[in-house]
Image: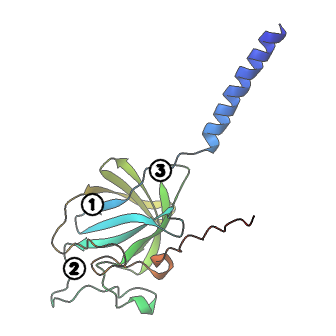
Amino acid sequence: MNIVLRFVLRVAITILMMAIGGRTGAAAPPDPSGTWLVQDGRARIRLERCGPSRDRICGFIVWMKEPADKRGQPYRDRENPDPDKRARALLGHQLILGLQATPEGQFAGEIYNAEDGKSYSVSLWRDSADRLKLRGCLIKFLCQIQTWQQTLDVLPGQLVGLTGDLNGPRADKEWATVPAPKPIQAKAK
């Protein structure tokens, strides 16, 4: 009887540990990195890893259907609350600001809207291999969901360079640099 009791206890403990482990160790959401065509077709957004430990997601406008006004001048970020950013072109600027993975399998944080110069809560997740869902909220209960389609081609005028390079988008200063890895100290003998 003692052997049967031990066996039952081991099985119960194993099941309990598996249940607890399954709840506490949430899987990382699928990486949304890539270039995405927004729902209305007016822009392409490149999502990539950012931040010091490359665990966040940043997004940049890399193509616009209409990148310039009627005079041929690039559209500018005129509504930005930061006066230093008002002269920057919309093409190439950062609009998704360091989203973090959530336990629900999404990435959440803020998105900047150049049309009104404000930032809003946003979450995004892969709906399928080539579709991304993006939920933006004005307030917690006033949200909209868009579906973005992944693109693999390059259109004329699309920025294809690495972020910070000549033909690439520009990160906001808080996301622009990734610190170099710390050197490993050799142990003295």
Tag 1–tag 3 contact (CB < 8 Å)? no
* Residue identified by numbered label 1: 39
Give whichever of discs 3 and 2 has the lower sequence position: 3
The image position of residue 1, as x and y in percent, is 83, 7
Name the secondary structure under disc 3.
loop
Nearer the observer, 17 or 113: 17
Give whichever of discs 2 and 1 has the lower sequence position: 1
Where 184 falls versus 23 (above or below)?
A: below
Where 139 falls versus 152 (above or below)?
A: below
Nearest to viewer (mark 1 / mark 3): 3
* Residue identified by numbered label 2: 67
Give whichever of discs 1 and 3 has the lower sequence position: 3
Mark number displayed over residue 9: none
Mark number displayed over residue 29: 3
Nearest to viewer (mark 2 / mark 1): 2
Residue depicted at x 26% and y 71%: 160
Residue depicted at x 21% and y 79%: 67
